Image: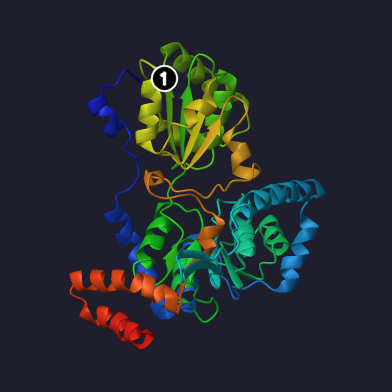
Amino acid sequence: MEKIIYPHKEDWSKLQERTFETYEALEKAVRPILRRVQREGDKALRSFVFKYDRVRIKRFQLTPEELAEASNHVSDELKEAINVAKYNIATFHLTQTKAVKKIETTEGVFSWQKNVPIAKVGLYVPSTGDAPLYSHILMMGILANIAGCKEIILCSAANHEGRIHPIILYTAHLLNIKKVYRVGGVQAIAAMAYGTETIPKVDKIFGPSNEYVSTAKQLVSKNDVAIDMPVGPSELCYVADQSTNPVYAAADILAHAEQSSHNQLVVLTNAEEVADKIQAEVDKQLNELPLKKEVAKEVFKNAKIIVFKSNVESIAFANEYAPENLVLAIDNAEAVGDRITNASSIHLGHLTPPAVGYYAAGPNHILPSNGFARSYSGLSVDSFVKKINFQQVTPLGLQNVGSTVATMSEAEELLGRKNSIIKRLELLD
């Protein structure tokens, strides 16, 4: 990791830049795939699946028997762990549901808002070789069930044998997701956005993604389908000081670095000796542990340890960076966390590794990255519903609010709206 000492404020924006391909280059690679799937349907899907996954798929959709049978290949220990995580995630997100509340804004004028589930949602579950990223299904599927979505579509790439990992299938079956398809990457996004002979078009697409899939989601969202949020490579911003345990810090940093070679990483501290201790411990654990070393080393090529003159500067930098995951590994973490306004998920104190938030604390781990924490939130039950507004006016209500509406309509030179009020008031007199 590159160590930077006391950067000037005017250099912060440069240090906060993410390192990945330009949007133009990504769009150039992605758009032809989208167009071809839209045009050719399943034929294009089979072609792209063979090209990128090196497998020939005859039947995309898994049968109910295949989904149920996956349970035989998952250990009881893992099933128990998944159930604990499922309970915690559901418990947290159930607090986001709200009963319909009718209010009287003016005497005789009633208004309320009703949550209506999005009917058909598509869940994208990325694949990284033989690693089953099944936890994403919990983070999306539980919320879709709480919201009451009628149809849940799940797409994930198959391996070279044409199989989706049994843990992914088990988790999908556990959440009563019945439509699971063997397709991943940009082509999966295209299939869910446009529909094919086999895969239905959905109303909204969810899921974490690399730069290419994220670009595909943004492109299809312009005209064809809604998406959850801008999601790119995962990010970790780690704030440390003299109270930080370098062993914990290194473990958290390596846990983030081994996930994907595209992951972004920045460590912020108020003391150079803290930076050096963390770097030394990272090197030690990297050599000792059975991690994905080559992946981690790619992340470290662009990673930074930045030393500031104070914790105040570290926190200010972190807030400007607007990271996906922010760790405050300091003594007064909760008080400092209250001052953060730009972060997708914050992990407080010395005993809260990001791994807990990722799997089993309860909050969602599908989060905006690339600075979009400034304007987007992580996945919630609200992501899976539409909010419909209702208004109902009584004769008394129309008399109370009518003149207000007529005056405002006239000021906007929309006399038809004024007339719609006047005609009713005349009949009430």
Residue at screen point 66% across, 43% down: 360
Of residues 68 and 119, the one drawn nearer to the viewer in this rendering: 119
Q: Which residue is mark 1?
A: 311
- In the rendered image, the quadrant that contains the N terminus is top left
Which residue sits furthest top? 273
- Name the spot of residue 72 as percent of width and height, x first: 80, 59
- Name the spot of residue 244 as percent of width and height, x first: 54, 18
Of residues 147 and 261, the one drawn nearer to the viewer in this rendering: 147
- Name the spot of residue 186 as percent of width and height, x first: 44, 63
Q: How is the image coloured?
A: rainbow
Residue 84 placement, left or right of 220: right
On the image, which quarter does residue 44 sit in?
A: bottom left
Residue at screen point 59% across, 75% down: 58
Residue at screen point 50% across, 13% down: 242
Residue 173 placement, left or right of 417: right
* Label 1 Cα neighbours within 10 Å, binned few <14 / some 14-19 / many ≥20: some
Residue at screen point 39% across, 62% down: 216
Residue 100 placement, left or right of 423: right
Residue 35 seen in this snapshot: no
Which residue sits furthest front? 429
On the image, which quarter does residue 395 sit in?
A: bottom left
Which residue sits furthest bottom? 427
Residue 256 seen in this snapshot: yes
From what the image shows, is residue 359 above or below residue 224? above
Residue type at mark 1 is Asn
Of residues 143 and 303, the one drawn nearer to the viewer in this rendering: 143
